[in-house]
Amino acid sequence: QIFPFERNLIACAQSQYYGVIGNGRLSVCQFDFQTKSIKEIKRFNTNDACFDIAWSEANENIIASAQGDGSLKIWDLNNQFPYGNIKCHAGEVHSVSWNINQPEIVATSSQD
């Protein structure tokens, strides 16, 4: 997902073995428009698959990630560990989105 505050930052959700088993990762990358290259600038490893991410609409340092263990992790780019971990579903969390009009609201989806 492209960073809503600057066009040159991109966040990526990753999982091993298509999320069936293994770890996950949230990567924040910086795109250089002149050289057309991408460089990873932050990396957050998770114990389960990371299926989706969403940048906060209110705080440029906050990202939410949808996790394979049914949780929603809240990350602060200035810290290496999750700022918050909310167990919100019984199954995998497939997607996450911040509300643009009410940035304190986060929506998630799962098969449960």
Image: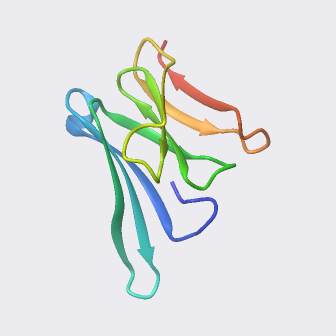
> Residue at the spot x=44%, y=23% of the render?
71
Say which of 34 and 102 sits in front.
102
Q: Relative to 91, is 17 on the left or the right?
A: left
> Residue at the spot x=45%, y=39% of the render?
52
Q: Residue furthest right?
A: 101
Q: Could you tell me residue 98's position as x and y percent?
A: 64, 40
Residue 22 placement: quadrant: top left
Q: Could you tell me residue 36's position as x and y percent?
A: 39, 81
Q: How is the image coloured?
A: rainbow
Q: Could you tell me residue 61's position as x and y percent?
A: 55, 53
Q: Relative to 84, is 19 on the left or the right?
A: left
In this rendering, the answer to whether 46 lies above or below 80 is above
In this rendering, the answer to whether 36 lies above or below 42 is below
> Residue at the spot x=40%, y=30% of the render?
67
Q: Could you tell me residue 24's position as x and y percent?
A: 29, 38
Q: Residue furthest bottom?
A: 34
Counting labels gives: 0
In this rendering, the answer to whether 42 lies above or below 13 is below
Say which of 108 and 87 sits in front.
87
Say which of 110 and 49 sits in front.
49
> Residue at the spot x=39%, y=36% of the render?
51
